[in-house]
Image: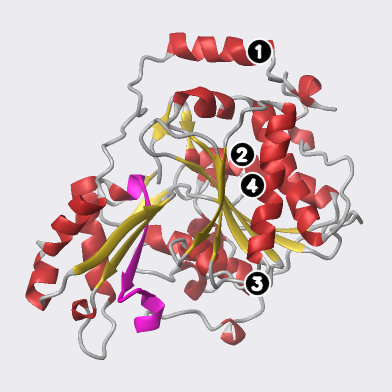
Amino acid sequence: MKKSIQLFISAALLFISFSAPRLGQSQTPIPGPSQISAFLNEHPLLREKNASVIEVYFQGEALVINLDQSILPPGTFDESIFTQLQADLDKAFDINRHFMTTFKVEGQTLDHWGQPMPVYEDLIDPPEILESIRSGPLSGVKVALSPGHGLYWNELYGEWWWQRSEFWGIREDTLNSEIMHYVQFALTNQGATVIQLRQFNPNAGIGVSGYPTWQENSRQYAIAAGLPATIYDGSNTNYNSDIRARPYMANYYGADIFISLHNNGWDGTLTGTETYYDHDNNPGSPLLASSVHNRIISTIRDEFDNDWWSRGVKKSYDAYGEINYAQMPAILIELAFMDTFYPDNTYLHDEAFKILAAKAIVAGICDFRGVTCQDISVVPPELNHRYYLPRIMR
């Protein structure tokens, strides 16, 4: 195994410093599909409509709930039904801290039943995006980068909330953005144009949340950019609208590739990387998924841990709104399991691991485009002062 002595020292210090339970901080038990089904079947909204649950299942961070058609008023889509169901599920099981929830009716997503969708042709032209000033093998390619989660305004409680819990010093809302900042820099060095779907600049100031803008979610970024409301108010809650804002922005700006980055969580026993594409998103999505996933696995195994686990490339059936509503080749990466203390959480504390992952994502995009990208540099100039960079720069 190609692990540094520093990695083992870091792991030992973490074990000594933290006496947190295995599931990390503020983590409630994950409900099973049968619990969720039983809860919903007894819910007043389902009982009064004589509706029932067809199926509940998990896929990565996605929770999919399929209801029968009785839940909808005849000929009318009622968004408030699903808003209430999700709010009550969250109160009972804290599901929004675990999952991104997708409701279906008779196996179809809600837009099939009348949930409004943006008509991009009717929108004003978007603000200009910053083109890369470098030429390279990815010149002319527009890549939309979506770091998952981020601070959002919880309208139910009237507060700014993190979307994910903290596990031994790591919170997905900030971790994803940190890694994507590296990806952005590397892509522009190869000539690509990056469409930011959250703020990446750590020096961009304080946002309306009172926190740095780079910690806020995609919906808030779209609002600050002055985009049309249909982009950032595309669903029934601020939480769900944040998910929709990402593909909607990518579509609006005409991205060629969409990359969503997440980090996983379950019960503290799982490990490794898995990558998703949607079954009917774009014909190029399966190749993009395999190109990026294979590069991540091979890079980590070659340069960090030759036992790193590949959980495979997986097909999603409308479970993830981020990739389901994108109009270009789109993938969602679950890099590692934050709630597994070792190896995943320990590795995610190591900047070298994060930089290798970013480098691999860019190399996978180059493979997908059929071009050779040499000397992929992932470290922005403002980070060059950090003590670890001489060790990891090659």
Q: Is residue 15 above or below residue 75?
A: above
Name which residue type carries label 4: Phe
* Residue at the extreme bottom of the image, as rendered: 75
Label 4 or label 3, whichever lies nearer to me, is 3
SS class, disc 1: helix
Task: Tell me which segment is drawn in magenta.
Answer: 96-113
**Residue 176 belongs to the span the image colors magenta:** no
Q: Is residue 370 above or below residue 373?
A: below
Q: Is residue 42 left or right of residue 321?
A: left
Pointer 4 residue: 200
In depth, the one of 331 and 260 nearer the eye is: 331
Q: Which of pointers 4 and 3 lies earlier in the amino acid sequence?
A: 4
Residue at 90 percent of width and 55 percent of height: 136
Q: Rounded to the nearest whole Å, what is the CA distance between mark 2 and mark 1?
A: 21 Å
Q: Rounded to the nearest whole Å, what is the CA distance between mark 4 and mark 3?
A: 29 Å
Q: Are marks 3 and 2 in contact (CB under 8 Å)?
A: no
Q: Which of pointers 2 and 4 lies earlier in the amino acid sequence?
A: 2
* Residue at the extreme right of the image, as rendered: 135
Quarter holding the C terminus is top right
Pointer 2 residue: 178
Q: Is residue 18 above or below residue 106?
A: above
